[in-house]
Image: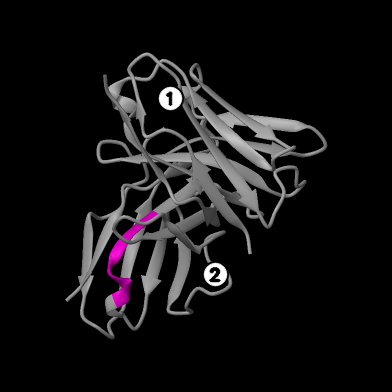
């Protein structure tokens, strides 16, 4: 049974970097048939796909145009996890952040528990 | 990339069937068979209910079914139960620079 466990701070100051980690159990971040995503949800923007990382003999990343200049998603094979970094945050980045993924590349079959991140000084 | 359009709310009585629509364009819903549906109860993470338009993951009740016609996908819940009361979101792969888009969400109320 695949599970995703998120960790990271719930409060970030404006202009700083939001950092979250998603630990995978029951599957591998290096799986040649899986994809690992970050998605956020806010009342103003609804559900918003942010980006993904996946391995197909080499590592690939895709990012949403809306955050492309500020986002990095990195796999960590030694810890079987992947991370989200979002730079230069503003209050508009306040949202519940979810990691999600699994073997269904074009759907999100496993979700983390969610992390409420507030951007405020 | 604009969000896919869903009705804000749909309601039905226990035992009835309801259908939620998800309207996009030929660049997303109409162009690919990668539409998925998610159920979200308050304070919880979304749960995958349907993938690739009409496939149910293991463990999801067969009361949930999906279909697509042109640029509109649909989720049907038959034999409505109190536990089905939740928010539902569709998602689709897109040919735009952002590969995935979600719907605006539909609140299902069981009367």
Q: Residue at x 57, y 33 (%)?
A: A83
Residue A104: image x %, image y %? 63, 54
Residue A81: image x %, image y %? 64, 41
Q: Residue at x 45, y 51 (%)?
A: A113
Q: Which residue is mark 1?
A: A66
Residue A99: image x %, image y %? 51, 44
Quarter of the picture holding the N terminus of chain A:
bottom right
Indicate left or right for A99 with A120 as reference.
right
Q: Image height check: is A66 above or below B27?
A: above
Q: Which stretch appears magenta?
A: B83-89
Q: Image height check: is B109 above or below A99?
A: below
Q: Image height check: is B92 above or below A118?
A: below
Indicate left or right for A95 with A23 as reference.
left
Residue B20: image x %, image y %? 33, 63
User: Dot 1, how many residues are within 10 Å of its Cα: few (below 14), some (14-19), or many (20+)?
Assistant: some
Q: Secondary structure at mark 2?
A: loop
Indicate left or right for A16 with B42 as reference.
right
Say yes or no: labels 1 and 2 on the same chain: no
Q: Which residue is mark 2?
A: B56
Which residue is nearer to you in this view: B89 or A20?
A20
* Chain letter behind tag 1: A
Label total for image: 2
Q: Residue at x 42, y 56 (%)?
A: B46
Confirm whether residue B93 shows in the render: no
Which residue is nearer to you in this view: A16 or A47?
A16
* Chain letter behind tag 2: B
Give yes or no for residue B88 being in the magenta stretch. Answer: yes
Q: Residue furthest right?
A: A57
Q: Secondary structure at mark 1?
A: helix
Between the residue at mark 1 and the residue at mark 2, the CA separation in whole angstroms equals 31 Å
């Amino acid at each position: 049974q695949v599970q995703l466990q998120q960790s990271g701070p719930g409060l970030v100051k404006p202009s700083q970097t939001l950092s979250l980690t998603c630990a995978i159990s029951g599957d591998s971040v290096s799986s040649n048939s899986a994809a690992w995503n970050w998605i956020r949800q806010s009342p103003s923007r609804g559900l918003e796909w942010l980006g993904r990382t996946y391995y197909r003999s080499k590592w690939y990343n895709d990012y949403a145009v809306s955050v492309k200049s500020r986002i990095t998603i990195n796999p960590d094979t030694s810890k079987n996890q992947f991370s989200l970094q979002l730079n230069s945050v503003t209050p508009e980045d306040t949202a519940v952040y979810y990691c999600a993924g699994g073997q269904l590349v074009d759907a999100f079959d496993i979700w983390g528990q969610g992390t409420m991140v507030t951007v405020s000084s | 990339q604009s969000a896919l359009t869903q009705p804000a709310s749909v309601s039905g009585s226990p035992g009835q069937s309801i259908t939620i629509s998800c309207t996009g364009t030929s660049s997303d819903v109409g162009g690919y068979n990668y539409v998925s549906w998610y159920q979200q109860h308050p304070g919880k993470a979304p749960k995958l209910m349907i993938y690739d338009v009409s496939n149910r993951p293991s463990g999801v009740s067969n009361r949930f079914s999906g279909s697509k016609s042109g640029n509109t996908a649909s989720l049907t819940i038959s034999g409505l139960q109190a536990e089905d009361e939740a928010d539902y979101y569709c998602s689709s792969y897109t040919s735009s620079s952002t590969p995935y888009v979600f719907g605006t969400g539909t609140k299902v109320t069981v009367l």
